[in-house]
Image (cartoon, rainbow, N blue to C red):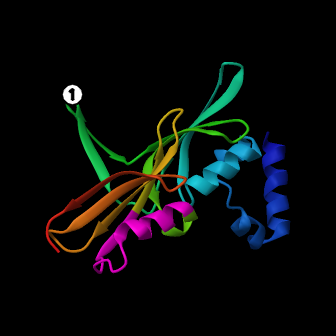
Amino acid sequence: MRTTGAVLTVVLALAGPQAVAEEKVDPLLFNVPKEVRKVCEETFPGYRALSVGERKEKGQTRYRITFFDPADRTIYGRKDGDEAIMELKQYRFEVTADGKVIEEPRHHVREDRVPKAVIDRYKKWLGDTPPRAMVVGWEAEREKDKDRVFHVWYVVNSVTGYSASFKEDGTLLKENKTGKE
């Protein structure tokens, strides 16, 4: 084992610092099938894996991967008996070995990762002259064995905000408009 570590150190040293800097694969995702790694990196770009579980279900290999967002500084606190515990928000994601997403927790997504059909329907939903937004945020989720859903929240001011949920094909599922314009 020491020899392998020494050889690896020598190889990395000979390859130079660029080889180490270019390695962006999460260490826990390094050992999963490339299809699983690809869908993880597309769904949770910039997130880090905390754990990877592998199991067989109905003759199919499934992976349950827990992620956290290193850019999110939100800390959740809880008590367990006399112990105070602080944790980062965790996202549990389930995918098959061939990259089919089974379950995806609700999480933030960049607008450029929202499907065109959803963006087109969202713009139609806002109308021709929407009020100027202070904040627009997108989230995605997939409940187990259901369609992926995109949620948007559109904050105009401290009393006015809109939210809507869309299927991946752009179908409006629900909407909410609050406050005054």
Task: Report the label total.
Answer: 1
The reply, left or right, for residue 127 in relation to residue 145 is left
Disc 1 crowd rating (10 Å Cα; few below 14, some 14-19, many 20+) is few
Q: Residue furthest top?
A: 58
- Picture residue at 80% right of the left edge, 71% below the top: 16
Does residue 71 sit above or below 94 in this rendering? below
Does residue 142 sit above or below 162 in this rendering? above
Residue type at mark 1 is Gly
**Secondary structure type for disc 1:** loop
Q: Is residue 110 visible?
A: no
Residue matched to label 1: 81
Residue 119 versus residue 59: which sits nearer the camera? 119
- Picture residue at 50% right of the left edge, 67% below the top: 120
**What is the magenta range?**
117-137
Does residue 46 sit above or below 131 in this rendering? above
State the image coordinates of residue 107 (x, y, percent, origin top left). 43, 52
Quadrant of the rendered image containing residue 96? top right
Q: Quick check: is 133 in the magenta stretch?
A: yes
State the image coordinates of residue 175 (x, y, percent, origin top left). 31, 55
The reply, left or right, for residue 19 in relation to residue 109 is right
State the image coordinates of residue 94 (x, y, percent, origin top left). 57, 36
- Picture residue at 42% right of the left edge, 68% below the top: 124
State the image coordinates of residue 167 (x, y, percent, origin top left). 48, 50
Quadrant of the rendered image containing residue 99? top right
Residue 167 versus residue 89: which sits nearer the camera? 167
Q: Quadrant of the C terminus?
A: bottom left
- Picture residue at 37% right of the left edge, 78% below the top: 128
Q: Quick check: is 27 in the magenta stretch?
A: no
